[in-house]
Amino acid sequence: MQQRGAEPRPTPEAGRPARLRFPDGFVWGTATASYQVEGAVTEDGRGPSIWDTFTHEPGRVVDGTNGDIACDHYHRFREDVATMAELGLGSYRFSIAWPRVVPTGAGTVNQAGLDFYRRLVDALLEHGIDPLATLYHWDLPQPLQDAGGWMNRDTALRFAEYAQVVGAALGDRVPTITTLNEPWCAAFLGHASGVHAPGITDNAAALTAAHHLNLAHGLGAAALRSVLPATGQVSLTLNLSVVRPATDRADDRDAARHVDGLANRIFLDPMLCGQYPVDVLDDLRHITDWGFLRDGDLATIHAPLDLLGVNYYSPTLVAAATPELEQRTSTRWVNDPQGPDGPARYPGTDRAFSVPQAGPYTAMNWRIEPGSLTELLVRVHRDHPAVPLMITENGAAFLDEPGPDGVVHDADRIEYLHGHLAAVHDAIVQGVDVRGYYVWSFMDNFEWAWGFSKRFGLVHVDYSTGKRTLKDSATWYRDVIAAQGVD
Ligand code: FCB
């Protein structure tokens, strides 16, 4: 592993096949999400979402910013799609803002909101780029939150209605529709640590939300199937973790099992196997009685899936909640934008801490360790061999600003992406069915509680003018796509 600022490894020369060549048909893409890029939050009938409310509350976002304008993708999408075409992208993963389509979350459909996504999809298809649309990337309509949000079972039913509207309107032109993005973040960062909207800090609420998100996935998948053409694919995206114990002690190993349950299996097992893991149910009985789980829910959640999207950035190291650690620990939570600089409580549990790891790091303080992605993919494939995988997000934030020549020379991002692509290739060689890879992100954007302070893009965005400039990593990725792999 090279350190930040080191020279990137060479990209394949034009015309010469890459040494790590990906299978024919492998999808090369980039990803964004509605609230992070669109802006235009009050235009054409869009209703407010929980992220509009949250970002306008003082102290929620480190730099005090919000997504009111963001990258202005709502108005500049044609320019952005043209850039994607220049890079040779085969697919663009974006999300649909529920409050654009159903402004109050239930009932009346806003045709103007749907029309925006129709224009976006048409522009992509005109350039030969496949759209991959996610229905829920965290921007819940505020009126649904006012009625209890994901703590209210009814939200899952409203989600299914919305899924059906989008499926009927766009399903003929969008080959794959994803129900949810990262329900772990929505449940645990939104309701346990509270660093994401709606900013609730209640472990029991987080578990209720997790179940209702699972239910929304199942109901949403069925609603999509009822309107999609026979070729239409339904997928789901999870942020899966490689969870390691801080020491070989039995209590730390048990903490790792416990966190693996909360981070991975609480979603994977009901969605892909139709059951909650017994150890997860048992571990959390002092927090919840699971009374929100109703007969028939698990069969609904266990909906047939065409593809499982995996978002992956960094491995997790955890320790048991011993009295010594309690003493050393601030009240911070994992993913708290203010920290953590020491052990931090793992969202949704009082039994485990996340502990800092050795570098190298990205600008998020996330450890860079590409091999852990291979480990994750091999494990998911071993546990769930029938479902094809897609890397729907992978990438890195670095402190990149244009140099005197106006260009961002982001050798560190190239190094990160190169390492992780090699890790994906390694998993494929080991027999894992990985269908494609989407860089997070196409362009710099509003990074949730971090505001505009973290840049993940292949394309630099000047937030005062909206001007886009390709970083070195964008042209590197273009060459990778052309060579169908990396050296
Ligand atoms: C993921 C989110 C995405 C972005 C990246 C950095 O958890 O899905 O919106 O914030 O992290």
Image (cartoon, rainbow, N blue to C red):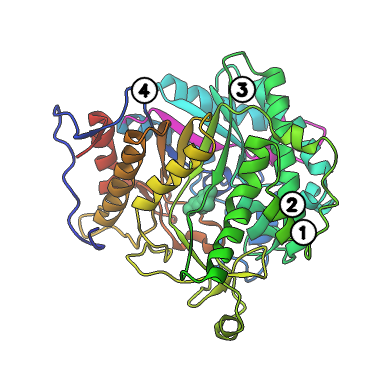
Disc 2 to disc 1: CB gap under 8 Å: yes
Residue on which the image places disc 3? 170
Place of residue 2 in the rendered image (x, y in percent of width and height, measured from the top left): 22, 59
Residue occupied by mark 1: 205
Neighbour tally class for label 3: few under 14, some 14-19, many 20 plus, Cα within 10 Å: some
- The quarter in which the C terminus is drawn is top left
Q: Is residue 106 magenta?
A: yes
Start-end of magenta stretch: 88-111
Magenta highlight on residue 298 = no
Left or right placement of residue 285 versus residue 339 in this view: right
- Residue 341 visible, this orientation: yes
Mark 3 or mark 2, whichever is nearer to me: 2
Give the residue type that dot 2 points to. Answer: Ala
The amino acid type, in three-letter code, at marker 1 is: Ala
Q: Is residue 361 above or below residue 159?
A: below
Compare residues 434 and 92 and report the one nearer the observer.
434
Judge from the rendering whether residue 398 lies leftward or rightward of residue 448; answer left or right. left
Q: Which mark is residue 448?
A: none
Q: Which labelled disc corresponds to residue 209?
A: 2
In this figure, which residue is indicated by the disc labeled 4? 25
> Horizontal and vertical percent for residue 162?
73, 32
Q: Quick one: label 1, few (<14), some, or many (20+) residues within 10 Å?
A: many
Q: In the image, is the residue at mark 2 within 8 Å of ligand 1 by its beta carbon?
A: no
Image quarter of the N terminus: bottom left
Q: CA separation, marks 4 and 2?
A: 37 Å
Marks 1/4: CA–CA distance: 42 Å
Number of labels in the image equals 4
> Mark 4 or mark 1, which is nearer the start of the sequence?
4
Spot occupied by residue 213 in the image (x, y as percentages of width and height): 71, 44
Q: Residues within 10 Å of mark 4 (few under 14, many from 20)?
A: few
SS at mark 1 in the image: helix
